[in-house]
Image (cartoon, rainbow, N blue to C red):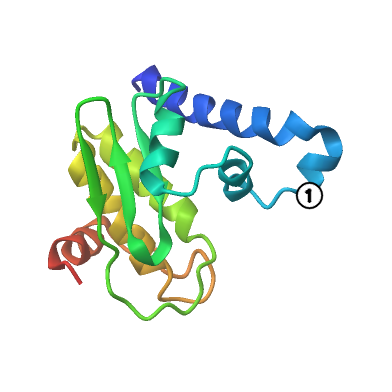
Amino acid sequence: MDCSFAGVVICVLFVFFCFQAEDGIRGAQESRGLGDVYKRQGKQDPEEIVAFFRSFGPKYVMLKLGGDGMIVETAEESHHLKAHRVEPVDTTGAGDAACAGFLYGLLNGWGLYRSGKLANAVGGLTVQHMGGAEAITSLEDTIAFMESGS
């Protein structure tokens, strides 16, 4: 396994926890996740948020935008991928599933764009079912959904 991928996760977690601790324990308890980090830093525009995280030096940044898709970016390329048009039932686990899909693609040498497309597809499949694990399907079915552009 390429250790640079572990560095991406560690960097993002480091940034998250640094900003969570910025206001001490009270600030961390009141936080509603990374959305609060953006607001505390005055970042609202997705491009500004991606640039903010890129400034910490990770090789890859993936910003999930819910129904607006996601942005995946490296120093060399950036893609805003539209969300799949589906009927959401439950968003539980969709973000985690998208992150897993993104990392799967990168670890298998798919490149930024295709890894982002897989992440988007996994997230789109996940929200169509109740519960985070109910949408788990085969890689082949997920790729078919990804390529269908639904």
Q: Position of residue 19 (x, y in %)?
A: 66, 32
Q: Position of residue 87 (x, y in %)?
A: 37, 81
Q: Which residue occupies 70% across, 36% down? A: 20
In the image, is residue 112 above or below residue 127? above
In the picture provided, is 138 more to the left or to the right than 58?
Answer: left
Q: Secondary structure at mark 1?
A: helix
Q: Residue furthest right?
A: 26
Q: Which residue occupies 28% across, 74% down? A: 85
Q: Which residue occupies 39% across, 38% down? A: 50
Q: Quadrant of the C terminus?
A: bottom left
Q: Position of residue 45 (x, y in %)?
A: 42, 48
Circle 1 Cα neighbour tier, 10 Å, few/some/many (<14 / 14–19 / ≥20)? few
Q: Which residue is identified by label 1? A: 30
In the image, is residue 39 above or below residue 85? above
In the picture provided, is 108 more to the left or to the right than 36?
Answer: left
Foreground of the two, 10 or 79? 79
Q: Quadrant of the N terminus?
A: top left
Q: Total number of numbered labels?
A: 1
Q: Quadrant of residue 88?
A: bottom left
The residue under label 1 is which amino acid type? Glu
In the picture provided, is 21 more to the left or to the right than 90?
Answer: right
Q: Quadrant of residue 69?
A: bottom left
Q: Position of residue 81 (x, y in %)?
A: 24, 54
Q: Which residue occupies 39% across, 26% down? A: 5
Q: Residue furthest left?
A: 147
Foreground of the two, 122 or 64? 64
